[in-house]
Structures are given as structure tokens and as C-alpha cells.
Amino acid sequence: MFKSFKVNITFRILSIIALVLALVYCVARTEFYITMFILFALIVLAVVDVVRYVNQTNRDFTAFLLGIKYEDFSATYTGHHKGKSFGEMYDAFNQINRKFLNIRAEKEANHQYLQTIVEAVDVGLLCVDEQGGIFLMNKALQKMLHKPFLVHVDALGQVDGQLLEAVRNLKAGEREMVRVSIEGKPAPIALQATEFSLRDQKLKLISFQNIQGELEEQELEAWQKLIRIIRHEIMNSITPIVSLTATIDGMLGAPGSRIEPEVADDVRMAISAIHNRSEGLMHFTETYRNLTRLPAPKFQLVDANDLVERIRVLFKPVFEKNGVRFQAQLSPAPAIFQADVEMMEQVIINLVKNGIDATKGRENASVTVSVQRNKDGKTIITVADNGIGIEKELLGQIFVPFYTTKEEGSGIGLSLSRQIMRLHKGRISVQSEAGEGTVFTLTV
């Protein structure tokens, strides 16, 4: 019909007036009853049409407000057929809808960005409300705790009771280190908490960080510094002693010496003993140089299956001589990783030797070396034996330099192995039961 709202309303009002005047005329002429009825019906319809036409704008406005309330910004509005002013109003509606759509898209993009960061970080994150309900738990924490999900913070008690107690008592801004056992493996976890409010709801965000690697690295650095100092002091003291014993020995045999031959022989024997023991101590000190002067690894692609095969060939005569059965459980697919071949061979050799020593005198003695890939793509090499095992209280000391339970051991094999694994950004761990055997695990 007409495009202008004013023209439409004016036309409709004039039509109603005309119909009313016609009805008044018919009432004055009483003989037009049917016409009066028709005119009355037309007046009612015209009034209803005016109300409907006017309310259409109200309905559009109400729909617009409801769309904002329920966050539905997909609707579009057009009012140019009602005139310029209505066209501008409906254009404003559409612009507001587009603005809200852009805000929503930006909000979703930011949420996706933050979610990606939360899932990508190596630190475990747990967000809980005041009642202990889990608001957020990222993949790093799921992997750390070996739990795909947690509904309530009390479920941490299923992992470790000390961990649950530490999380409950942790205040905002505090940092605490707790030693827990996750699936039988000890793990030092650093906890830190912060509090914030989200939509009038108080939440606590707790970070979980396994600092086993950091502690091992600091411990290793401390031992290296200590060994360097000890070695330096010993060498400074022993070197002149060795030199003096040689000088004194020469003086005893020099012409014109007034020392009686028998006394000279006794002194010479004493000096020889001092000389030999000093050289032995120097040799002992030089042995520990390896712990502080490991060369940088020469990385290349290595197949763990090939490594194990070389070890099997190398130790075949040793296994046969000691009556130890060797088993190699290789990965069905190549287990390739970056490593220094000689260094990694040395680590496995150390562990296999320990396994042979641990099984001496035991029936059905066996050493098993297996290779597999975990779900993260890491190569896992395990060396297991059914030997005498290690007492639980000694497990924390076996990687300490100089510590050994063997009569002829130097105490550097496992320390050296751990240092090599650190150079390869890998880990070495141990599980053992006294009397049942030991399993060393290399992850690289």
C-alpha cells in the first residue's frame, strides 16, 4: 500500500471517519438497516487494522529487546516501508544486533584462546569453588594425576591423602611443596594458589607442578660442585706427597748415606706404601672426574631396538657365564629418538651389569630389557631383573655419587647414568621390592 507510516495512519483514520459519518447518515435514515450493519462491521475492522498496524512496531521493538535478553541476535529488521524515521530506527536495531554478534564472536575467540593456553601449559591447573566443586581441570593435571576428570576436590584423596590435605589448607598467595605417591611413584609437587571472583562466585585456582626434574638437576649440580672441590683439594694434597716419597726414596739410595741398610730398607718400604696408596688415591680421584666433565652429547637418530640388540650380543658370554637368562622385548615398530649412541649404550650397560650382580646365586635368574613407545611419543626402555631388590629406605640414595652396596663398587654408575639422561632431556626412575627384583625405566 503506502510506504509512509504517516500516510498509512492518516488514510486509515480518514477511512474510519468516513465510515462513521456514513453510519450516522444511515442511522438518520432508519430504513438502511443492512447498510448500517455493514458500515458498523467495517468500522470495527478498520479500528482493529489501525491498532494492529500501530502495534506492529511495538511487536518489533519487543522482539528486539527479547532477542537481547536471550542473546539471540540473528534477527534482522526492516522499516523503510514505514517511512524515513522508522527506517532509521530499524537500521539502528540491525546495527546493535551486529555489534552484539561481534562482541559474542570476540568473546568466544578470547575464550578459545585462553582455553588453548590453559590446555597447552605444562603446569597442572585446578579451579574449585567454595564448596569444593571442580570448575576447571586441564590436561596437564589429568596426565599428572592419571585421572581423566574430578567432580569434587575430595576425589584428590583417591590419589594421595597428603595431596588432598595440602590443597585444602593452601591459602591464596601461598606456595607449598608436598611429596606424594602417584600410582606407586614418588613425586614432589609444588602447589600455589590464587583467588578471584567470577560472576559473584569466589573461585580458587591452584597450580600443580612436578618439580622432580628440577630437584634432581639441583642435586646433581650440588654434587658436581662438591666433587670438584674434593678432587681439587685431594689432588693439591696428594701430588706433593707422591713427589716427596720419590725424592726421599732417591735420597736413601744415594752414595754417602749414613742411614743403616736395615733402617733404610724399612723406611723405603714405608715410603713405597705411602707412594702406592697416594697414587691409588689419585687414581680414585681421577675416576670421579667423569661425573663433572661429561662431554656434550653428539645427537643422532637412534633406534632403541638396535641398541638392545647390540647389548644382547655384547653381554651374551657374560649371561652364559653367570647363568642368567636374557630376554629382549622389542617394540614392533621402530622406536627412534635423538641421542648420543655411546652414552645411551653406557647407561643400559650399567643397568644390565647391576641386574647381573643382583641376580647372582638366585635360581632362574633373568634380566629383561624391553622397548616401547608411550602415548606421548616418548621412547621407554626398561631393564628389569628378578634379583635381591632394593630396600625401600635405600631407593632415595642409589643415585647419590659414591653410594654403593657392592663391595667393589665405585658408586658412580647410577649417578653417571642419571646425568647422561639429564643431558638427553630424559629421565631415569626405579621401582623395586626387596627380594623380588628391580625395574629401571629410561624415558627419552
Image (cartoon, rainbow, N blue to C red):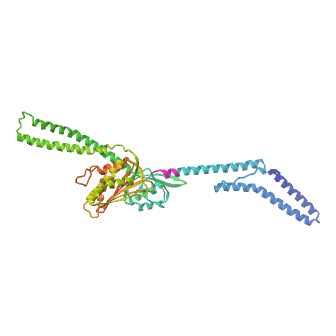
Name the residue: 88% across, 57% down: 18
Depth check: 225 or 276 in front? 276
- Asked if residue 179 can be seen in this view, the reply is no
Which residue sits furthest top?
A: 256
Q: Position of residue 149 (x, y in %)?
A: 48, 60
Q: Is residue 119 magenta?
A: yes
Whole-percent x, y for residue 261 in the image: 5, 39
Name the main secondary structure of what is drawn in magenta: helix
Residue at 92 percent across and 62 percent down: it is 26
Q: Position of residue 166 (x, y in %)?
A: 40, 56
Q: Which residue is at the front of the view, 192 or 408? A: 408
Examine the structure image and report whether residue 5 is included in the region drawn in magenta: no
Q: Report the span colored magenta.
A: 115-122
Identify the image quadrant of the N terminus.
bottom right
Q: Is residue 363 left or right of residue 266?
A: right
Numbered marks: total: 0
Q: From this viewpoint, is residue 107 visible?
A: yes
**Depicted 235 relative to depicted 376: above or below:** above
Q: Residue at x 12, y 43 (%)?
A: 270
Relative to residue 256, is residue 422 drawn left or right?
right
Residue 274, by quadrant, is top left
- Image coordinates for residue 301, horizontal then vertical, percent: 41, 48
Question: In the rendered image of this protein, does residue 255 appear above or below residue 145?
Answer: above
